Image: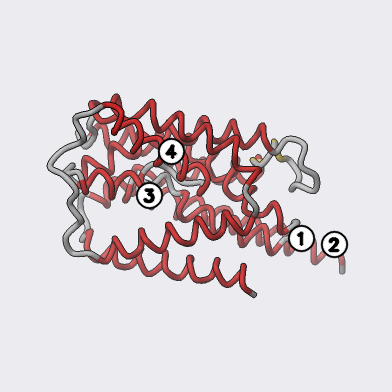
């Protein structure tokens, strides 16, 4: 009987990671978000079902998600680049700030409690969901700021918050770029590339900062679970370019509404996990 229960738990874990990899890859290609906005909550629920300590669940989900975003961003960014939907000039202006913010966030992650990270993820996901429902995006300017320091501040905040959420640059970067009058497809493609500037330093930071934390899942380096990474990343890499193709063909308005509903459900469920 105990062996049967263990087998069932492992089967659920394996199937859950497979589904997460497929969905995360598609979402990464469609929205340039690196898939983390989907991967983090699903990993959190999977780790919860396996009864790992509550105080490290969110940290493990975030760290494992960021590791997966590295190859996913490469795959997604390459597909967008081949379609001409990437602004290299924006990457030059924002890359350094995003990298700096991400490495600070990765190293600082262990100082945030699990509930604080849940609140951060749920609140940002809810705001992103509301933005999905808008017919016309909010406009803050006709172009990126002219002053370098302002670009550094904006990009650093995006990198810092994104690393604490376990997401790529698209979750905050795409709506910010669109608000600064960057065309949506260009914003998505550029954010996919900028995801690397978040995922690499933040993953290293979380792997380092969680190295001595006890009771982590087996096969973990710090807050990065290698089992989750190696099962998910081949799928996210394969399905990200497919998501890119869909992004240029299907009704983006309908897709955003569906994704927005999913994000609201995710936010509410995560908040309930804190309250109850």
Of 154 and 137, the residue lying toward us: 154
Q: Nearer the viewer, mark 3 or mark 2?
A: 3
Question: Tag 1 or tag 3, which sits nearer the N-term?
Answer: 1
Position of residue 91 relative to residue 213, above or below, is above
Residue linked to disc 3: 171
Question: Tag 4 or tag 3, which sits nearer the N-term?
Answer: 4
Q: Which of marks 3 and 1 is in front?
A: 3
- Residue 96 appears at what percent x and percent y? 38, 25
Residue linked to disc 4: 159
Question: Tag 4 or tag 1, which sits nearer the N-term?
Answer: 1
192 vs 137, left or right, is right
Image quadrant assignment for residue 148: top left
- Residue 84 appears at what percent x and percent y? 19, 33
Of 145 and 263, the residue lying toward us: 145
Question: Tag 2 or tag 4, which sits nearer the N-term?
Answer: 2
Q: Which of marks 3 and 4 is in front?
A: 4
Residue linked to disc 1: 7
Q: How crowded is mark 1: few (under 14 residues within 10 Å), some or many (20 or more)?
A: few
251 vs 232, left or right, is left
Residue linked to disc 2: 3
219 vs 236, left or right, is right
Identify the disc placed on residue 118. Answer: none
Position of residue 186 relative to residue 49, above or below, is above
Image quadrant assignment for residue 94: top left
């Amino acid at each position: 009987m105990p062996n049967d229960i263990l087998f069932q738990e492992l089967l659920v874990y394996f199937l859950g990671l497979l589904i997460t990899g497929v969905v995360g890859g598609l979402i990464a290609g469609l929205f340039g978000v690196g898939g983390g906005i989907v991967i983090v909550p699903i990993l959190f629920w999977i780790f919860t079902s396996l009864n790992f300590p509550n105080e490290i669940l969110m940290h493990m989900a975030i760290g494992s998600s960021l590791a997966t975003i590295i190859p996913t961003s490469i795959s997604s960014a390459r597909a967008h680049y081949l379609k001409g939907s990437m602004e290299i000039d924006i990457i030059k202006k924002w890359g350094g700030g995003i990298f700096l913010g991400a490495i600070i966030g990765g190293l600082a992650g262990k100082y945030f409690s699990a509930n604080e990270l849940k609140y951060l993820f749920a609140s940002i996901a809810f705001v992103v969901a509301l933005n999905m429902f808008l017919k016309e995006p909010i406009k803050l300017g006709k172009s990126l700021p002219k002053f370098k320091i302002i670009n550094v501040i904006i990009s650093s905040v995006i990198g810092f918050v994104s690393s604490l959420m376990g997401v790529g640059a698209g979750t905050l970067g795409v709506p910010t770029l669109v608000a600064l009058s960057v065309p949506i497809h260009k914003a998505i493609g550029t954010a996919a590339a900028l995801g690397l500037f978040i995922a690499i330093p933040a993953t290293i930071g979380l792997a380092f900062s969680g190295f001595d934390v006890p009771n982590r899942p087996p096969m973990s380096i710090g807050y990065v679970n290698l089992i989750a990474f190696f099962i998910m990343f081949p799928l996210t890499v394969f399905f990200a370019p497919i998501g890119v193709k869909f992004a240029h063909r299907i009704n983006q308005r309908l897709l955003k509404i569906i994704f927005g509903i999913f994000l609201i459900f995710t936010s509410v469920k995560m908040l309930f996990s804190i309250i109850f």
